[in-house]
Amino acid sequence: MHPFSLKSSKGAPILPRPVFVFFVALFGFYVCYLSFNQITLENKREDNSGEEQRENICRKPYVSYEELRYVHFPKPTTYSRGECSCTPVRFFVIVSMQRSGSGWFETLLNSHPNISSNGEIFNRVNRRENISSILQTLDKLYNLDWLTSAAKNECTAAFGLKWMLNQGILENHDDIVSYLNKKGVSVIFLFRRNTLRRVISVLANDYDKDAKQLNGTHKSHVHSKEEAEILAKFKPELDTSTLIANIRNIEKAIRGCLDHFKSTRHMILYYEDIIGNSNALSQVQEFLRVPVRPLMSRQVKIHTRPLPDLVKNWKDVSSKLNGTEFAHFLDGPDYRK
């Protein structure tokens, strides 16, 4: 071939220009796609790292490893805890019986700026129809989405409720114990040592539900001595034929409850102890891991007189209980330390 010939030599054909441009553009798109995914993954890692860091910041300074299961950082759906989102919350439940001082005790707890006790939420039947409704109600409460006058919301450090023995807790005790342990809920048992006084208080309260002695209004708790004196004027007559059996049934229910819930983190408190032991309320606050401070209540005790002045047929009651294991209810100081 002549060295200056313009005829092309044989070899690989050259791609047309449009096809070449298409492949270049496709390659550029692929590079952009990989870069975008890399940025997204890095952002996700940063977000997750931030969440983990916040969790660590919230948890580490406050509690030991042993206490970790009882400390929670709820995220309510109805409001934001804001700057208190790292304030650890401990869950509790007050387990008691009507006319055992639980209402008064709850007002004492709620006078603490960091404690919210939300009353007898299971006094409504639809909330305790079955274990499913019970657990659903508890979940809502312990997520801090339970709004009552007692709720302090943002900086609450102890959050709970009051649960009476006749409100489904004993009938479903196995599932409830499992839930409380799994959820890290502490239990405060509050009962009365003098069961006879509780029986008298129950009868007097039942009478007032119909009589409505305070200007046509029934009040289970009062805030003045004048109101307390009006309610205390009524003297119930006790059925001595069933009195001992009634007391035994009450004490049996208490023993059964304590036995069912013995695996929970709990403390046992008596109404008489709160009155007679100046350290009792401090011990409760220490149990809930909140700063100890004086607690106050506006409630006024109704039945302050000696037992013989509270019962219409006192002689019959005294004769019935004397010589039995319940004779100690009759004499001695009303409240012992």
Image (cartoon, helix red, strand yellow):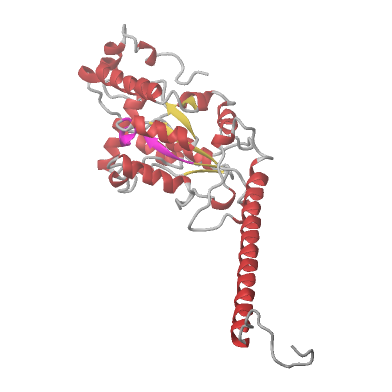
The single residue placed furthest to the left in the displayed view is: 241
Q: Nearer the viewer, residue 15 or 8?
A: 8
Q: Position of residue 330 (x, y in %)?
A: 37, 15
**278 over 69 or under it: above or below:** above
Residue shown at the point (57%, 30%) measured from the top left: 287
Q: Position of residue 121 (x, y in %)?
A: 38, 44
Residue 31 located left or right of residue 96: right
Q: Is residue 24 visible?
A: yes
Residue 335 located left or right of residue 286: left
The single residue placed furthest to the front in the displayed view is: 1
What residue range appears in magenta?
160-170
The single residue placed furthest to the right in the displayed view is: 3
Q: Nearer the viewer, residue 334 or 324?
A: 324
Q: How many marks?
A: 0
Residue shown at the point (65%, 44%) measured from the top left: 56
The single residue placed furthest to the top in the displayed view is: 323
* Magenta region includes residue 166: yes
* Magenta region includes residue 320: no
Q: Nearer the viewer, residue 261 or 304?
A: 261
Q: Position of residue 279 (x, y in %)?
A: 59, 26
Residue shown at the point (47%, 45%) measured from the top left: 142
**220 over 25 or under it: above or below:** above
**241 over 141 or under it: above or below:** above
Q: Position of residue 51 (x, y in %)?
A: 62, 52
Quadrant where the N terminus sits is bottom right
Residue shown at the point (55%, 57%) measured from the top left: 80
Q: Is residue 307 visible?
A: no
**58 over 169 or under it: above or below:** below
